Amino acid sequence: MATRTNYDDKAILLSKAAQIVRKDMMAMQYIFNGTFETGCHNKTSVPQSLKTLVGMILGGPNIKMQSSNSIEAQTTLTISQLLQFNSSIRRRKDSSTVFHSTEQEPPLPIYLGLLLHAETRKRGLIDKMYSLGLSLSYDRIMNLSTALGNSICEAFNIENVVCPAKLRSGVFTTAAVDNIDHNPSSTTAQGSLHGTAISLFQHPVPGNVGVERLTIPIDSTVSKRENLKPLPKLIPSSLLLFFKRTCRNTNGLWSDD
C-alpha cells in the first residue's frame, strides 16, 4: 500500500512538472523568416523551463553539478527543440498523419529538412526523417524552398541585378569566365551542352569587409505552395551592373566613372 502511494505521489509530481513546462512550450513561438540568426536555436526557439528540465534529466537535478560542457549544452538544446517541435495542445488520436504548427517550428528540424533536400533531393529520406520527428515534411520543405526563391527573386528585381545573394556590396570583386562544352561523341552521351561558367571572387580587406545586401524576410506561415516569381530582364547585363555598383565604393581600386 505504501509503495502504491509512493508511485501516486511521483505521478502527481511529474504531472505538475509537465503542466509547468507545457504551459511555457505552448506560449513559445518561433517563425522562420528565411535566415538563421545568431543564437536563434538557444534564445528564441525553446523556453528556458524546458531546457532546464532536459538538462536536469541528462546531468542530474543538482544545479551546482550541472555541466558547462558545450557538447552537453548542445545535446540539451537538440532534445529541447525536438520536444518543442513534436508537442501538441491536445493528445493526438490514432492517425497516420502528423500536423505541426508553423509557429512552433524550431531551427533544428527546419535546418535538417533543408540540408537533406539540398544534399540528396530524396523525398523518401526526408519523409522518413519527418516520420521520426526529426525534420519537416517534404511538402513543407518545398513551401519554404519556394518562399526562399521568391525572396531572392524579389531582391533581384528591387536591385535590378542578378548575382549570388551572399555577395557583399563595396568589396573589390573579380570574376573568372570559362566555357562549358560537353562532347557528344561519347557512347553514353544523349546530347551536347554548350554554356558559360562564371565564378565570382571577393577580396575584403581589414578596413573594408563590405556591406550586406538587401534581405527580404519570407512568409513561412503560408501553407499553400506558391509559384516562383520571374527573374529580372536582361540578366547578362545585370552582372556587369553589379560590378559597377560594387567597385564604385572600393576606395578607388576600380571605378566606372
Image (spheres, rainbow, N blue to C red):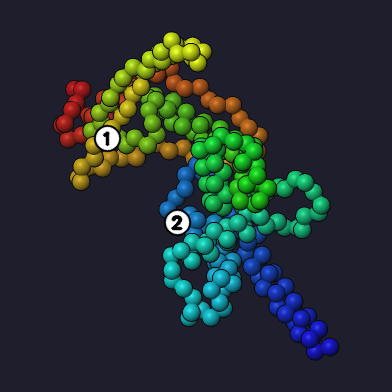
Where does residue 149 sit, x and y in percent of width and height? 51, 31
Q: Quadrant of the N terminus?
A: bottom right
Is 130 left or right of 255, judged from the image as shown? right
Q: Label 1 is placed on what type of residue?
A: Gln
State the residue at coordinates (56%, 71%).
58
Mark carried by residue 114? none
In the rendered image, the residue lying farthest to the right is 1
What is the crowding at mark 2: few (fewer than 14 residues within 10 Å), some, or many (at least 20)?
few
| SS state under label 2 | loop
Looking at marks 1 and 2 on the same chain, the residue that comes earlier in the sequence is marked by 2
Rendered location of residue 115, percent (x, y): 51, 42
Hey, which quadrant is residue 179 in on the image?
top left
Question: Where does label 1 land, which residue?
Answer: 202
What residue is drawn where x is 25% and y is 28%? 174
Give amino acid for label 2.
Gly
Residue pointed to by mark 2 = 39
- Could you tell me which residue is drawn at 20 percent across and 34 percent down? 250
